[in-house]
Image (cartoon, rainbow, N blue to C red):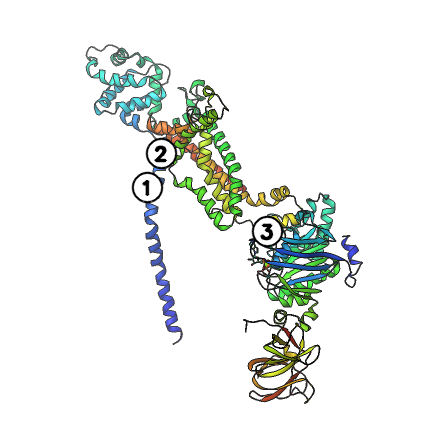
Amino acid sequence: MGGGPGRRGRLRGAMRVPREQLRALGLVAPLLIFIGVTFIAALATMLMRSVHDPVVADALPETVALLRGWDGERLPAEAVYETAARELSRAGEERTIGQVAGRVNRVQGGLRSVFTRTARDLEDEAPDPAAATGTPWRDALIALDTAWADPATWHAIRTTGERFTSRNYLNAVDMDRLPDGTIARQPEERRIYLRLFWRTLLVSGAITILCLLLGYPIAHLIARAPPRRAALLLVLVLVPFWTSLLVRTTSWIVLLQTQGVINDILVAIGLVSDDGRLAMIYSMTGTLIAMTHVLLPFMVLPLYSVMRGIPPQHMSAAASLGATPLQAFLRVYWPQSLPGVGAGALLVFILSIGFYITPALVGGSDGQLISNMIAYHMQTSLNWGLAGALGGILLVGVLALYMVYDRLVGVERMGLH
Amino acid sequence: MGDIAEMVSQPRQEAPPEVHVEFAGVSKSYDGRTLVVKDLDLRVRTGEFVTLLGPSGSGKTTILMMLAGFQTPTAGEIRIGGRPIQNLPPRKRGIGMVFQNYALFPHMTVGANLAFPLEVRGMGAEERRERVGRALELVRLGELSDRRPGQLSGGQQQRVAIARALVFEPSLVLMDEPLGALDRSLREEMQYEIRRIHRTLGVTIVYVTHDQQEAMVMSDRIAVLRDGVVEQIAPPEGLYEEPERAFVASFIGENNRLHGRVTGMTDRDVCEVETGGVRVRALKVAPCEPGDDVTLSIRPERVEINPEPGRYRNELDARVEDLTFLGDHLRVRLKACGRDDFIVKIPNVLGHGGLLEGDGVRIGWTASDCRALNHEGGEE
Ligand SMILES: Nc1ncnc2c1ncn2[C@@H]1O[C@H](COP(=O)(O)OP(=O)(O)OP(=O)(O)O)[C@@H](O)[C@H]1O
Ligand SMILES: [Mg+2]
């Protein structure tokens, strides 16, 4: 008797569990779908594009197939010319020639116009097959443009004709595959990405250190302040978060530019002459100052969260045990704040590696970072494959960093809870 | 202070006369308006175990923090060994301190925690190891040197905290409710340990607790604090037997607390007090004159039920309301002196008589066991 209702209650409870789980799943489903579409799918597409490029292979399938048997040194056989001519003019009709020309142009500069022009001209310049002697298609194409007598042109078709390619990644690290298949560094004047990666790392490191130097005392102050004042200070730290990134960055322009507030003040108090105004923006300096400001909260918050967990008695205990304030800090406080330092530094470093808007606005030409280059390839040169490869390298780098941090400190100690 | 071994060979003498710590007219205010410590005068002799006992918020921690140097007195002077220490930062005061929550450094091993005060004093590795080993022996934690504080039980952490406060051999050790977080049995064990260490080393200890039993067990003298004022300072027996303030009488041990008005003086020390419609004679502790309100304090074990007639100066009628058998004694709740919560304890010895609920009885007590203390209104 006594156990009856209890047992039934338990059974009903057991039945309820899956339904509650279902409800929970239903509640998070929109988020999962959103992340799936906007983040994972987008990421996968971009990464896919960096290794997969079917444009040329689709537009000139037979030419590409025939070129596989080409030795790469002498001019290809007549059959190749004939097929290429046929497929080029078809691409011209189907209006895919622009894309094809763009692809080959990336391998061999100047080929864009060669391809579009050839495709257009082939319509009226087709050789008469009856009168053909020897190599009529080859002659006809070379007559249209001498580039067709250059093996490099055919090499460009062959390279871009690969559906799956490592070309973008090689380019992203300033390398290229030579016609004979070997991999070599790009010529001096075309090596830009590695230098940019390196600069990005240096700038991110510098910003991380600046944020740490500025953020550590602030976080300590907030963690030690009485609750009301701590809340106020936290709000002050967070205000920048609530302001548009664009507004914050442009206000730095207002402050730092040659005719800006700071220079005006310096001139007014006579520290610099009117024509000796300091160039503080549109340069690396501008990028450093503005990005440090923008990213500072990301350093302060994890530091604060860890420091708040360090009992104030520890410093008193250290003092009562005979430690000077410096000893107490170095031996007792700093080691305990390290998880926060790690979390903040990791956060700021990763964010600054991928930062885009601020360097674009205040970086000038020498304050540009790798993400500005990615944006350039996304928006201007439309070389999405290369953009994807640059982004992929960035992603792997960040993941590697995260793993190193996990190994050294342990992500669970980051204090982001 | 000398070596630990030296201390062992030199057993503690009857309270050496010299004053180790002295508070002279010390007051403290945090906000500039209310004083949380008021005009404190306190002397602690070398090697003495003095406990500050008082309810929460009575200023115990504040006093300790001023002594350790983490708070500055608003007025008055603190002297250690006769020297004013106002301008000495905490690290130079050479005081060992055990914090309420232990304040062990979680990122260091137990050994490193203990070595820390030696390290910052620039002591060599060899001597450090030796001293740390000895300190761990003292608190019986020899094998745990390589553990982290997080891997220790509460009692073990407590011992480490004590060892750390002792390892640099301070002559004065402060403990702020060190056993507050421990359960009852562990607490009793640790009380014993701290006593043993105190006897072994002969250091001066200023101890803070709000547990009166703990204070009674451990201390040479107890200072009872209320609202920043020392109500009484005396050895445990003195506090129990001869409380001078109503607050002390009720804070230390059980007591019957009666409110009354002085009606006359019997002789120099004894006054007559009317309470609940009866007149009793009481020892005049607080200065009082006829017409003054006083609080009477009578310990439950000092009241005899059905005494030989004429034996006591105070004898009156009462009725048994409630009987509780508690093993070693019988607890009797009586209706007497106009109230029904008058408690009497009868030791469980042969022939304590068969009382029944509802019985009418006579009760009696001496005038000296009934102390007329300052009037304390409000609480009852
Ligand atoms: N840092 C501080 N700032 C302001 N007021 C304080 C501060 N520390 C203590 N007080 C106040 O001083 C009074 C005495 O506090 P104290 O900590 O000395 O009490 P305590 O006797 O140690 O109490 P407990 O048994 O609860 O630890 C309390 O009213 C408290 O609110
Ligand atoms: Mg306290």
| Residue at x 56% of width, y 71% of height | B377
Q: Residue furthest front?
A: B290
Picture quadrant of ligand 1 = bottom right
Give the image location of residue A351, x and y in percent. 44, 36
Mark number, residue A313: 3
Find the distance from the CA under tag 3 to the CA under tag 1: 50 Å
Three-letter amino acid code at the position of disc 3: Gln
Q: Quadrant of the N terminus of chain A?
A: bottom left
Find the distance from the CA under tag 3 to the CA under tag 2: 52 Å
Which marked residue is nearer to the observer: mark 3 or mark 2?
Answer: 3
Circles 3 and 1 in contact, beta carbons < 8 Å: no
Q: Is residue A383 above or below residue A299?
A: above
Residue A240 lies left or right of residue B228; in this view the side is left
Q: Earlier in the sequence, mark 3 or mark 1?
A: 1
Q: Is residue A371 above or below residue B348?
A: above
Q: Which residue is mark 2?
A: A46
Question: Is label 2 on the same chain as label 1?
Answer: yes
